[in-house]
Amino acid sequence: MNLYEETYRLTKQIPKGMVSTYGEIAKALGDIIASRAVGRMLNENPYEDVPCYRVIYSDGGVGGYAHGIEKKVEMLKRDGIEIINKKIDLKKYLFKDFKTSYPLKKLREEQEKLKEKLTLEDNFDLKTIAGMDVSYGKYAYGAYIEFDGSRIIKKKVVKAEIEFPYIPTYFAFRELPILQKLIKGEKPSIAMIDGNGLLHPRFFGLASHFGVLNELPTIGIAKKLLIGNIKQNDIFIGNKKVGRKINKIYVSPGNKISVATACKITKNYMKYTIPEPIRQAHILANEERRKNEG
DNA sequence: GCGACAG
DNA sequence: ATCTTGTCGC
């Protein structure tokens, strides 16, 4: 699923003499939450026949343009769009009748389906623990570090094309292709992943998704709270306990592990603010990106 | 108007 | 995570 291409395909549907908004394209992708990502994807658009200048803010403001706002205004006027007090009348010019298959809706359904295979039962021997992370530049650089106790026994990096932007709650679809490359041929007892597990609006964040796909115990580690309420460091979504805040990080079970065990293991690796397997993977992924891209 | 939005 | 084309709800 290349969401960049989907977005460009949708944008090309906006006819001359009409405009659309970042939010309307996001809705055509399947979720308004992607509106900011739509802006980013259009900013990176490489195709000359994609009319990015026809996409404006939801309040009628013209918005930005990679080639300069003046250029955007000029091209809109050439299309016959009136701009009064720097605003465009969306009642008059809005196009939102996109032909679309709502790709993000399909991805949500994939999360809901796979979620049936998730378990929070502890059922593993703790021998080795892996940390995994991805760093982004022109390409994505993934890093895998495996610990036996406090000793590093394996390091590995991969490089891949970026095919999906960061969209809150769809993070897995950006990062999974790289993590899948990394885990190939590896068998850690458990993997620590940068991102959430159960701590997710559909109770199926990256750590859970990755865990279920590989039938592996996983722990999700996030540096910011995506959703939920904190009471005495326990994290709740509604009245479901989905994780726990430990110092400055948010820990949630991915797969094949309980909240309590996920916390216990995480605490054992808290040398700095981020648990050591994640921290080491993060460093290695960044090093690899800098080495390749300067 | 300002903050929130896993990375 | 980088680098800066959003939207909504408080």
Image (cartoon, coloured by chain):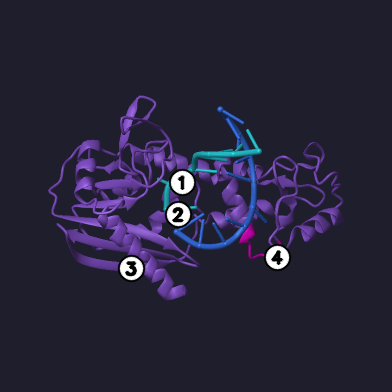
Chain colours: A purple, B cyan, C blue
- Identify the residue position indicated by label 1 in the image: A170
Looking at the image, tell me whether mark 1 or mark 4 is earlier in sequence order.
4
Image: A252 above or below A171: above
Amino acid type at circle 2 is: Arg
Residue bearing mark 4:
A48
What is the CA distance from the residue labelled 1 to the residue labelled 2? 7 Å
Rendered image: mark on residue A157: 3
Q: Dot 2 corresponds to which residue?
A: A174
- Seen from the viewer's position, the closer of residues A18 and A240 is A240
Q: Mark 2 to mark 3: distance in Å? A: 17 Å
Judge whether B4 appears above or below A15 on screen: above
Give residue A178's position: percent from left, percent from top: 38, 60
Q: Are marks 1 and 2 on the same chain?
A: yes
Residue A57 is marked as none
Q: Position of residue A163 (x, y in %)?
A: 50, 59
Q: Could you tell me which residue is drawn at 72 percent across and 46 percent down?
A: A20
- Look at 19% across and 64% down and name the residue there: A152
The outermost residue toward the top is A239
> In this picture, which residue range is highlighted in magenta?
A43-49
Question: In this orientation, does residue A173 appear?
Answer: yes
